[in-house]
Image (cartoon, rainbow, N blue to C red):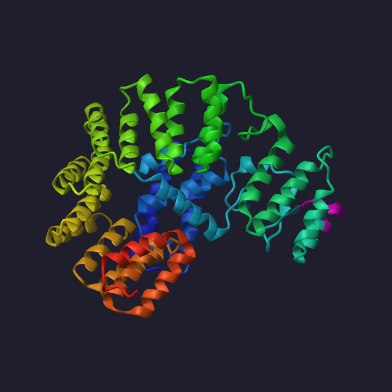
């Protein structure tokens, strides 16, 4: 049974998703959103007990959108992912991650029997869904071929089932249906990447031009169509695929600033900041009055450690958009990274004044105070942040850092454990937890947490080496 606080959170979450659907979508999405929230609420460990409700509301709609082609302009209704995040004032990267967790939590895929829209289910071939396995099966009793495929799958003979489906050639009227089966088998066996590709092929084999899935039968002579395909893959977080279409679009329309903008963001998401800077500079030459361009130019330069140039870019962005709290916060981060703590605090304070309900600039102030050793002010800012959302992962990590700096290692580890409850696949949470154990002198726990961090991402070894080198209290 849920406690009273969790019940209240569930009602608040339902109200939030309902309001969005009333304004932006329709009654069907509203019903599906409420149903998904209620299903989350029935779990033993209710996910939304922790974390900011705005993030969970965004993630619920985002997850439903991903399995129902909400982000494809050829479907109705259509809403872009950024529109969801802007509505709830959430970060797309955080929402995308939470949506993935929700999909994994309930094994949500395209044509899900419980959470698909009626329109989507009408385009599904004549297939049913097995109640126990969730596997798509034929609705015709005398369809022996697909009965045999399903039986092979049910018996665990995956390779045999796929081999049988491979005998259906692309000139066979049943080719699309065979691809749907292969997609579901791939999904059921955990190969999501192949499953998505097979779904795309199957949809186009079945419906051709009736269902326009980007990068299949696309008009490569139409820059707008190429740009739309790029946006589709950008919204799906497949930045490499997005870049292919943006690049093709720019060859036809090289001075299109919107394409250049999203091309630069895609490159930045792949950590290709030099290339991203080159692209955004071209956009600025064409239109120097778009504050977004200058802001992101500042972000790219920050990552490249070009301090003076980044500062000038943020100043230009603020001249165009002086009330944009995000730009002030980004400028604050630049100063923090370069140990200009007074300037950093001032920028974060300005961002807080412009967006008093946003926890992230306050977190920035906490990080500044910790960095310059003013732990009393850091605690005051932490108390301020707790009034907004003490379950936010950034709040928890900042609280852990502050406790560590106060040498309260036990309390710090408690906070890192809460971070890990939210995201146990973040290697840095395990690294910092290990760091605490090392300073505390608990070598076994130190090694255990390091092993977990390296299991998740071996690439964090260089960070571990830096931390060990910084403090002799950490066992080597």
Residue 165 drawn at (x, y percent): 80, 51
**Quadrant of residue 281 in the image?**
top left
Quadrant into which the N terminus falls: bottom left
- Total labels drawn: 0
User: Is 453 in front, or is 176?
Assistant: 453
Query: What residue is rendered at 20% in x and 59% in y?
Result: 382
**Quadrant of residue 447 in the image?**
bottom left
Query: What residue is rendered at 35% in x and 58% in y?
Result: 51
Left or right of 327? Residue 66 is right
Left or right of 92? Residue 381 is left
Q: Is residue 195 magenta?
A: no
Residue 395 drawn at (x, y percent): 28, 58
Quadrant into which the C terminus falls: bottom left
Query: What residue is rendered at 49% in x and 57% in y?
Result: 101
Query: What residue is rendered at 52% in x and 49% in y?
Result: 32
User: Is 33 in front, or is 260?
Assistant: 260
Q: Is residue 6 visible?
A: no
User: Is 316 in front, or is 136?
Assistant: 316
Residue 343 drawn at (x, y percent): 15, 43
Residue 194 drawn at (x, y percent): 65, 49
Residues rendered magenta in the picture: 138-148
């Amino acid at each position: 049974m849920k406690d009273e606080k969790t019940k209240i959170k569930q009602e608040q979450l339902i109200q939030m998703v309902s309001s969005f659907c009333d304004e932006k979508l329709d009654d069907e999405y509203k019903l599906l959103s409420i149903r998904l929230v209620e299903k989350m609420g029935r779990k033993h460990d209710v996910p939304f007990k922790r974390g900011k409700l705005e993030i969970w509301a965004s993630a619920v709609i985002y997850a439903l959108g991903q399995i129902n082609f909400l982000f494809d302009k050829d479907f109705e209704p259509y809403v872009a992912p950024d529109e969801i995040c802007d509505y709830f004032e959430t970060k797309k990267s955080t929402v995308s991650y939470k949506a993935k967790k929700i999909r994994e939590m309930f094994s949500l895929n395209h044509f899900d029997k419980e959470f698909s829209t009626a329109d989507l289910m009408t385009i599904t071939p004549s297939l049913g869904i097995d109640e126990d396995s969730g596997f798509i099966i034929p609705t015709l009793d005398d369809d022996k071929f697909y009965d045999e495929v399903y039986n092979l799958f049910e018996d665990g003979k995956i390779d045999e089932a796929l081999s049988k489906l491979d005998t259906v050639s692309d000139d066979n009227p049943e080719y699309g249906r065979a691809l749907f089966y292969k997609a579901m088998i791939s999904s059921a066996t955990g190969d999501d990447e192949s499953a998505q590709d097979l779904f795309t092929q199957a949809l186009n084999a079945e419906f051709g031009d009736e269902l326009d899935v980007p990068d299949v039968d696309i008009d490569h002579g139409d820059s707008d169509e190429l740009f739309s395909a790029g946006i589709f893959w950008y919204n799906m977080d497949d930045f490499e695929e997005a870049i292919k279409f943006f690049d093709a679009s720019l060859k036809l329309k090289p001075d299109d600033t919107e394409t250049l903008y999203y091309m630069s963001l895609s490159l930045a998401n792949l950590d290709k900041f030099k290339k991203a800077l080159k692209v955004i500079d071209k956009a600025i030459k064409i239109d120097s009055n778009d504050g977004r361009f200058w802001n992101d130019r500042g972000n790219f330069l920050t990552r490249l450690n070009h301090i003076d140039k980044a500062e000038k870019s943020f100043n230009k962005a603020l001249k165009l958009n002086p009330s944009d709290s995000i730009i002030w916060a980004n400028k604050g981060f630049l100063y923090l990274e370069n140990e200009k703590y007074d300037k950093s605090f001032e920028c974060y304070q300005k961002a807080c004044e412009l967006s008093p309900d946003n926890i992230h600039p306050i977190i920035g102030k906490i990080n500044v105070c910790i960095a310059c050793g003013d732990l009393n002010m850091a605690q005051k800012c932490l108390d301020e942040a707790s009034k907004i959302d003490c379950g936010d992962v950034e709040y928890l990590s900042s609280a852990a850092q502050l406790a560590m700096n106060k040498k309260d290692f036990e309390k710090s580890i408690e906070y890192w454990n809460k971070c890990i409850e939210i995201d146990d696949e973040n290697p840095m949470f395990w690294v910092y937890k290990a760091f605490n154990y090392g300073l505390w002198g608990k070598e076994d726990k130190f090694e255990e947490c390091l092993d977990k961090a390296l299991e998740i991402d071996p690439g964090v070894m260089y960070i571990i080496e830096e931390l060990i080198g910084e403090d002799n209290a950490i066992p080597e």
